[in-house]
């Protein structure tokens, strides 16, 4: 049976796809955010990784230039041209009736701006799912659940705060639930699904 992740892998540009054991890394070479391993048992996971890219042998373009070609990327307000680092698509079972979508942002320490990046990751994920639903020939269509994750290298501070236990914050504009986790080590995707 063809799954939503099979269709996503076929339709998305191969430059942004990551499968298999996932290790999330910030693309900024000056970053101090440690790599974060994503673990899962059972089901399927596919990641879309955003960052500077070269397409069709051309020059490397900053993420905002290739990901948001319809918007003026030189303006800082509103933050329509800020992207999260990854979007993880996780189907907990082999024949999923449920799909978890995790926009993820990696931060060295300060979490300011992460909400806008996760918000735009949510919009991008919804668009991708609509494209897959339209062209991917997937049946039955799973129920999608969206949750944003910020992985912070230092003790999280700023507009979002962590308390040692998983707290979920709701974005007022999109209703996306978000949380902050310490970067590095391993994190099981299943723990974000409950």
Image (cartoon, rainbow, N blue to C red):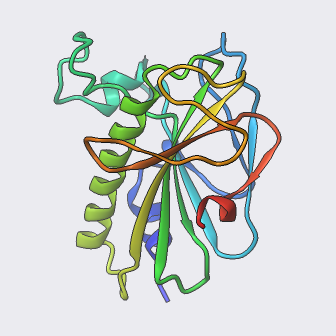
Which residue corresponds to the image point at 74% horizontal and 39% vertical from the top-left? 36
Residue 30 in the image: state x and y as whole percent.
Answer: 66, 10
Q: Seen in the image, is 114 located left or right of residue 34? A: left
Q: Pick the residue in front: 59 or 86.
A: 86
Residue placed farthest to the front in the image? Answer: 163
Q: Residue at x 55, y 86 (%)?
A: 95
Q: Whole-percent x and y of residue 124?
A: 33, 46
Residue 107 visible from this viewpoint? yes
78 versus 182 height, above or below: above
- Residue found 38% across the figure and 60% down from its top: 11
Q: Whole-percent x and y of residue 48?
A: 50, 47
Query: From what the image shows, is residue 50 above or below residue 176?
Result: above
- The picture places residue 145, in percent across and down from the top left corner, at 43, 65
Outermost residue, right side: 185
Residue that appears at 36% across and 30% down: 116
Q: Is residue 53 above or below residue 190?
A: above
Query: Could you say which quadrant of the image residue 69 lies in?
Result: top left
């Amino acid at each position: 049976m063809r799954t939503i992740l099979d269709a996503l892998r076929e339709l998305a540009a191969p430059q942004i796809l990551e499968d298999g054991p996932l290790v999330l890394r910030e693309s900024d070479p000056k970053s101090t955010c440690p790599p974060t391993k994503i673990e899962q048992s059972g089901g399927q996971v596919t990641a879309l990784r955003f960052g500077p890219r070269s397409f069709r042998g051309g020059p490397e373009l900053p993420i905002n230039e290739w990901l948001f070609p319809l918007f003026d990327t030189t303006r800082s307000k509103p933050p329509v041209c800020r992207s999260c680092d990854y979007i993880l698509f996780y189907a907990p079972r082999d024949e999923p009736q449920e799909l978890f979508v995790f926009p993820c942002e990696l931060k060295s320490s300060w979490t300011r701006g992460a909400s806008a990046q996760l918000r735009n990751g949510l919009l991008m994920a919804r668009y991708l799912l609509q494209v897959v639903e339209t062209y991917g020939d997937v049946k039955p269509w799973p129920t999608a659940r969206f949750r944003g994750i910020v992985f912070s290298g230092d003790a999280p501070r700023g507009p979002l705060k962590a308390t040692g236990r998983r707290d979920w914050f709701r974005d007022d504009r999109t209703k996306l639930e978000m949380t902050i986790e310490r970067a590095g080590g391993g994190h099981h995707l299943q723990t974000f699904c409950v």
